Image (cartoon, coloured by chain):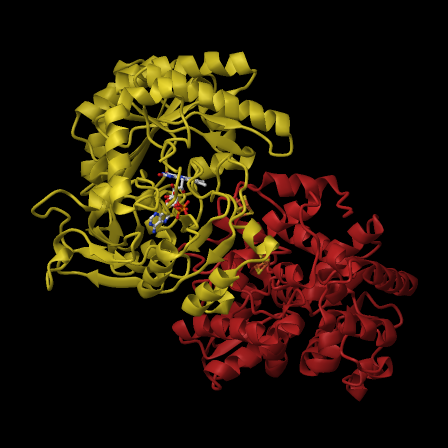
Chain colours: A red, B yellow
Amino acid sequence: MLNLKSEVLIDALYKCGRCSYCRGYCAETPIICPAYELTDRLEVVSPKGRLQIARHLLENSIRPSKELSLSFFLCSLCGDCKDKCIEGIDTTDVFEAIREILVEENVGIDTHSKFMGSVVQNNNPYFEPHEKRFAWLPKHLETDNPITPEYTYFVGCTSAYRRQPIAVATAEILHKANVRFTFMDEVCCGSPLLRTGHKEVAKKLAMKNIEIIAKSGVKKVITSCAGCYRTLKQDYPMLLERELPFEIIHSVELLAELIKDDRLELSDDKQIKVTYHDPCHLGRHSGVYNPPRDVLKSIPNIKFVEMSENRNNALCCGAGGGFRSGYKDLSIELAALRVSQVKKIDAEVLASSCPFCHYNLELGRDKIDKNLKVVDITELIAKRLL
Amino acid sequence: MEIQSFLEKIVGEQYVLAEGFEKIVYSRDASIEPPVLPDYVVRPRTIEEIQKILTFINSASHKHPIHIRCSSTSYWGGGVPTKGSIVLDLSRMNEIIEINEDTQCVTVEPGITFGELHTALEQKGYRIGESPESAYSACVGGHIASMGTGLGQYIFGNQGDQVTGLNVVLPNGSLLTTGSGALENIPKFTKWMFGPDLSGLFIGSEGILGVIVEVTLKLYTLPQAMVFATFGFENIDEAIGTIHQIQKGLFSIQYLSCFEGESFVTTYPELDWGNKAKSGIVLTVVIEGKSKEDAEIQKKRIKKDALKNDGEDLGVQFSRDVFWKNRYTWAVTRSLRKGLRSIILFHVPTKKTPLFWEETRIIGEQFGLKIGRSCQARSRHFIDYHPSIRYSEENPEEWEKVKACKNALYLRFIELGGLPCRLPGQLPASITHKFKNYLDFIRKLKSCIDPNNIMSPGKILGL
Ligand SMILES: Cc1cc2nc3c(=O)[nH]c(=O)nc-3n(C[C@H](O)[C@H](O)[C@H](O)COP(=O)(O)OP(=O)(O)OC[C@H]3O[C@@H](n4cnc5c(N)ncnc54)[C@H](O)[C@@H]3O)c2cc1C
Ligand code: SF4
Ligand code: SF4
């Protein structure tokens, strides 16, 4: 017997009017559900289809199975369906809840259980030793710990192990702007686990991180990862059912402030045409759209251009929601689709503000145009620091 | 099993769905009708594949019924299969085949959504004449097969009027081209040929006569100017009086609707509607013009009509661009935010609309239900009256009550002289005898074209 206790969930499942707007098409969003599009419009993986299946699970007219799992895991939780749903259904919440049930029923995705094992063992999903979490940290920044830091920089696993230049760039900028910051002996924020149905383990990680931050007495946490940002800011208070005793800030939000306050001096360079990819967790999930654009527009000699699919209509890069680890080929295909939207406006640089997007967009780029530069906004700024 | 492997041989293994959970999502449409699981779902890509499937089913010893599905946004059960059937999902057939700038026609596959088609056409400065309010998700094939009505219809006619030719796979697997395209080397620029209008057989057919696999529609250039006007009335008689005046004038109307103010105003809480709107009826009209001046002149005349009928100019304004961009999230879809609704759609003589309006209230009260009332003029000759009842599928009793109320409305509205624009699966004989000859003729036609009755059995009054 399935246990879908949450009233909110039940309400959502019965609210769907099967209008199909969540997988529709319009000029602003040529593709709403990337999973539906990548599978040749297979209704089973459309948001509407998933909700129908979820409802039958709730009514116990079907049983969870490995095959059925596909319907819920072949999804990057990009949130575009939630954004477009005319009944206002929080689709991604429903999908996450069902994933949890599927995992409980032992019909989850093997690669997800594997990285969950690594998080438990190593505090990161990349099977890397915890001791190497700060291997990227340059010597001059290591000794830079102020006595009364204002911020702590929560690096996140992807920047710490897979996209270290983003961590370096972020720390360099903070250092240059005389921001009083420190690091913490962080563990994985839990985002990959929350998204793939391992909520209980994620809760433990949340408690651990919160304890460490609270102990340090720091009141502001910066992160350069969109996934960590959403998790710390939105999921932690929900998981622990209380408000956090500190504020969560994404690096682009702080950068926008620093630039506004003239705390960063940037050098000139030859003009380049740059566009911006909104990470789902920062954009649609958290509503942070303007700061990254303000930052890009303030860099000398950068010509900022928008893709027509931008802000809440941005196409997902395919990395998140356990999609990359579960369905690698499709995930890269999606990244390539996103890069093809960049090609339409002839931008030379594709900037983003999430190491995980960076990771996947590079793979997508390699399938389409090796000349396109994929960068994190922090890298663009760090290169221009005077 | 034999059938499954045969279907797989035609379309490829991954395009035949037979698992219970897979079939669930093909068991319903957007209507109140409860789900029915098909035996198989097949997802063809080409016309040839569809021909092979139909030929095979027709010659098999067990003849599975076939139900066609584009986006399954039908509000009337057209997308609910019957037991033991095969669903033909056409969503993979979604290409634009040709934009012919000479004939000003576009040819598409049936599974393309209006949203996709508009996007491609607008880049070339074109539009099609009519699109449903479900345009982002509904497909061209499904709309034609359900005799679609929608935005733009007042000026250009309904979707059937837009068709200049169809390609249809008939139940025996053969391919029929209707309209001028039936003649080799002639473009599909008109549906009118010598002989009867064969396209008309399939427009509104709900799939009972064959599978529409290609559609050619008329193109128009994009609108130049639009103005928006909103009027408040104390009662429906005044509002309908105004609509009738508008229908008599030769206006170019994109959108003309009447809503109960109370519910309409809460659908748009961000706008200031004034008191008259809140307690009475809100009439909104979008006027298209060759130029801004032209549109404004029309608006002035309409305003005069409205004021003559004791209306009040509510002054709520939108620009052309705002309306054009939001035209498919403007009314019906926006009101869905308040919950599920079951809709009934009748064409009624304009001046009789207040009678239907009042009757709806009375029947609603009998069932203890609040029925939302609204109507649109999508033609100069009648009104599209579409009351809607909110319901929750979580509550089976309420669900049943709404269905019963809907049936009562159907019966009463037919008695009052309304034309059910979409027919439910069944109506009592006391009603169907009123158009017995019409139904008999369709029955005979169907048995000629589809002697084994494999195509969408039961979808038009049990046919
Ligand atoms: C929010 C909302 C707003 C709506 N607004 C409108 C509106 O303004 N006007 C309006 O008319 N409707 C409206 N509808 C109803 C519905 O969207 C339309 O009827 C739409 O045209 C159906 O298209 P579809 O692709 O979803 O067709 P489906 O639901 O898939 O099919 C509709 C019927 O046609 C048959 N069919 C489908 N494809 C074919 C084919 N290729 N060959 C033969 N038969 C076929 C099906 O078997 C079924 O009987 C609305 C629905 C919603 C949810
Ligand atoms: S979250 Fe994104 S990928 Fe998942 S169903 Fe919604 S639109 Fe599709
Ligand atoms: S848009 Fe919302 S209500 Fe419509 S089908 Fe999708 S999830 Fe259901």
Q: Is residue A351 left or right of residue A143?
A: left
Q: Nearer the viewer, residue B113 or A280?
A: B113
Q: Nearer the viewer, residue B348 or A348?
A: B348
Q: Nearer the viewer, residue A247 or B12?
A: B12
Q: Residue furthest bottom?
A: A139
* Residue B339 visible from this viewpoint: yes
Q: Residue furthest front?
A: B61
Q: Position of residue A316 (x, y in %)?
A: 55, 65
Q: Is residue A190 left or right of residue B276?
A: right
Q: Is residue A191 left or right of residue B101?
A: right
Figure quadrant of residue A216? bottom right
Q: Is residue A342 left or right of residue B355?
A: right
Q: Position of residue B279 (x, y in %)?
A: 47, 16
Q: Position of residue A173 (x, y in %)?
A: 69, 76
Figure quadrant of residue A155? bottom right
Q: Position of residue B353 (x, y in %)?
A: 33, 18
Q: Residue furthest right?
A: A215
Q: Nearer the viewer, residue B146 or B230?
A: B146
